[in-house]
Amino acid sequence: MKNWSLMLAPLGFVLCGMGILYLKMNPNGGPLPAGAVPGSLNGFLWLAGAALPALFLQAVIIRRREDTVLFPIVLMLAGVGVAEIARLKPELMIRQLQWIIVGMLVLLLVLRFWGHIRRMLDYPYLLGIGCVLLLGLPLLFGTEIGGSKNWLVFGPISIQPSELGKIVLVFFLAAYLSDHRRVLTLPSHRFLLLRLPPLRFIAPLICIWGMAVLMFVVERDLGSALLFFGMAVLMTYMATGSKSYVFLALVFIGAAAAVSYAMFGHVRVRFDIWLNPWQDPNGMAYQVVQSMFAFGTGGIWGTGFGYGHPGFIPEVHTDFIFAAIAEEMGLVGAMMIIACYVMLFWRGIRVALAVRNEKEMLLAGGCSCLILLQMFIIIAGVTKFLPLTGITLPFVSYGGSSMVAGFLLLGVLLSLSKEQEHG
Amino acid sequence: MADWRMKRQILRTASFLLMLVGLLTVYIVYLSAWEADDLAANPLNMRSAAARADIRRGSILDARGRVLAQTRQDGSRSYPMGAAMAAVTGYNGEKIGSAGVEGHANRELLGLSENLSRIGPISQLFQSDQGNDVKLTIEADAQQAAYDGLDGRRGAVVVLDAATGAVLAMVSSPSYDPNDIESNWKLLSKQADGALLNRAVQGLYPPGSTIKPMIADAALTNAATNEREIFDCNGSLDVGGGQTIRESHGEVHGRVDLRKALTESCNVTFGTLGMRLGDEKLKKAFERFGFDREIGGDIVMTRSHLPSFGTLGSGDQAQTAIGQSSLLVTPMHMALLAAAYANGGVIMKPYLVQQVITPGGTVIHETVPQKWLTATTPEMAARLDSYMEDVVTKGTGKAAQVSGIRVTGKTGTAENAAGKDHAWFIGSAELRNRRIVFAVIVENGGGGGTQAAPIARKVILSLQN
């Protein structure tokens, strides 16, 4: 059985390769302009170049008796992403494959040095400061790309520190919450109907909530803000089981939303677009309206790979890649992508439930939730279920920071899945 | 340590998140299944327009496979015959819409034979990036001959195959060049009776004497006269109310029977017959020949304007019988009238598109000729056909004679408010393997026998082989 799972790993790349071959099959067929498909053998060499380390890694994972399903699912998502990028922005396809290879390298490092990395959990305050620094950097030195001021530019490379920041946040929350779990669950103060611990214990939490709001207002990065805030709430509940925190958090975010809606123009614009995109379908709401058209045109079965017109959506290869999938592969394809995430999530939760150590249990739960929540926020955004946000679809969207961060998370989950064997 | 409590909380959190994802999934299903049609059809959604723009429009071919319109490598459209064929091909432009075959065969030219978008990617198997070719019934040589015959004068020519209804030529003049219509659009669209009006099917004219074969038919059918009756033409006819009908050029035909009266186009005789027939029988005759209806299908023909039968005085009855009064018809309809006598009383439905051919060469549509009307009996048709032969051999239509070919016809010189008389000639010719019928009008051209009949002759010559 284990040997069979070795063959699961390159499945995503096989799928991707077939997709690219299919695109090449109609040089003039379909609406793709001739020459839009990566022409040379180069693309396939890189694809094979990515499949080999994938096989090697899966072999390592099998040998180390770690979860054998997580990695193939991630590669499946990444494979779909590469095929879709080859169709949308062919010139970025090889770049994306390179990022995947870098991601797998990072994954290997995490697996190899997990013993060191896990020791970070013993220094919650350092993690907290690190998290604040990472998120605070763009506030000071940030560059605005695509409407969000959350990028750091070093020469030719631009990175999104919030991608790394969210992982540090999960580490911090896991460490901090399990250290102070008992205090936090101690019902010392009663405030109205809420049971609250002393203020100094919940101060770090409020700090994180406040930072999330700041991120949105100053960096205009609603997606990351929602993600950070959501993670803080979810992990607090996982650790303490206290509904008071959840309630408090909702009140807090509600108040913050109301205040920023009243005070900041760009916040108001975001929400007005969400509530009624048809008021300005060719202006402010253009992206989301085009994205909804993509879903409508795709319908249940989609227009067929290569036959849609996802190019009408700006930034379709990053944040809106899901709309492109829905247009060309239809509801069926979209559901399969979501199913992949749900399976990934469920395997992650299984890892969390099997771990004995409290901190690691929280860490595994947090990592799983992070991936699913990010998927939820961006897909809800492109379908107008929630206000539109600018974050990536993990493993599928184009983007280096996001891909590396995704493999980092996967590395943590895989390492934790090993623990169950050893007890 | 309360390990199980934390596990429970993790499970709860996980279920909550999965519930959120479930809600989102339901919403996406709603969006892609229920809302989909509205979103896909939203006017702001450019996707279906873009899908059409991706398709290379097919060619339009004439009956012998000559290209009348094709798409160049760069996607633009070229019309090799230009203005001469414009009344047939029409035009197609993003900003100006479409007309002619480009308009009504649009779906075929794009290969959108059925709307298959709901079956998803499978529809791509049936949708090619190259639209279908449309093969017309048009004979490019006849079209060119007719266009050259009009020689820039205002007018129209329609040529049909009598046995099938196939349109062999359809010319309207003045014309426009569809190759550069978009740059001239502003000027063209401003002219009220300009080049964009397809006179062959949309131009309304008094038929003049070309209506006389039908009146003769009606008079014989209703026993208002017989072939032996002799009419005495002294050059003018008192139609009551102080009005008189005169012969053109002050001619006097003397004693004529019906055959002679038609051959010489005697107004006195036909005015008399009109009054004898009266409103009811005249109306019936016009209805028998379909003057009260449109054709439908490929040919978008304007309906004729008939006098308000039932209220006509004897003067109007006489005027109607010689094709004047308030009677207005299209050249296409006069060709159909000629077709009735050339085809044993049966008028076939005119059509332009013979075949729709896929890029692979498969014929996916072939038009089967259809009967439109039975206008008159075969006997009556044969009799009138022989009368009309006399028009060409010894009467007013000698200019249409072609040696070795039996040509029939009827001239017309229609008075009108716009100025000089319209010159008409309708008729038929028996070619080696088919019988063609035609209607020619030269606006304000003068005499039908001298101005219109020679154009018919040119068309016959062009189709001779």
Image (cartoon, coloured by chain):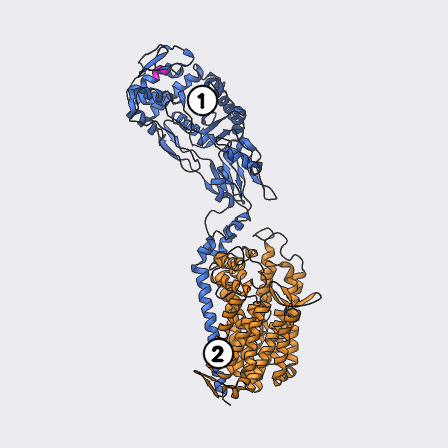
**Considering only vertical position in the picture, is A226 above or below B98?**
below
Q: Is residue B9 magenta?
A: no
Residue at (32% x, 12% y) in the render: B230
Q: How many marks?
A: 2
Find out whether the residues at labels 2 and 1 contact each other: C-beta distance under 8 Å: no
Q: Which residue is mark 1?
A: B425
- Label 2 sits on a secondary structure element that is helix
The residue at the far right in this view is A155
> Residue B270: image x %, image y %?
35, 18
Relative to the observer, which residue lies in front, A218 or B451?
A: A218
Among the chains pictured, the one given orange colouring is: A
Which residues lie in the magenta part?
A: B266-270
Relative to the observer, which residue lies in front, A46 or A159?
A: A159
Relative to the observer, which residue lies in front, A113 or A18?
A: A113
Among the chains pictured, the one given blue colouring is: B
> Residue A251: image x %, image y %?
48, 75
Q: Is residue B101 left or right of residue A29?
A: left
**Considering only vertical position in the picture, is B362 above or below B177?**
below
> Residue B457 shows which numbered tag?
none
Q: Residues within 10 Å of mark 2 (few under 14, many from 20)?
A: some
Residue at (62% x, 55% y) in the render: A36
Q: Residues within 10 Å of mark 1 (few under 14, many from 20)?
A: many
Main SS, magenta residues: helix
Gap between marks 2 and 1, in whole Å? Answer: 94 Å
The residue at the far front in this view is A263
> Residue A248 shows which numbered tag?
2
Q: Amino acid at mark 1?
A: Phe
Q: Is residue A47 visible?
A: no
- Label 1 sits on a secondary structure element that is strand
Q: Is residue A36 visible?
A: yes
Residue A92 lies in quadrant? bottom right
Which chain does tag 2 point to?
A: A
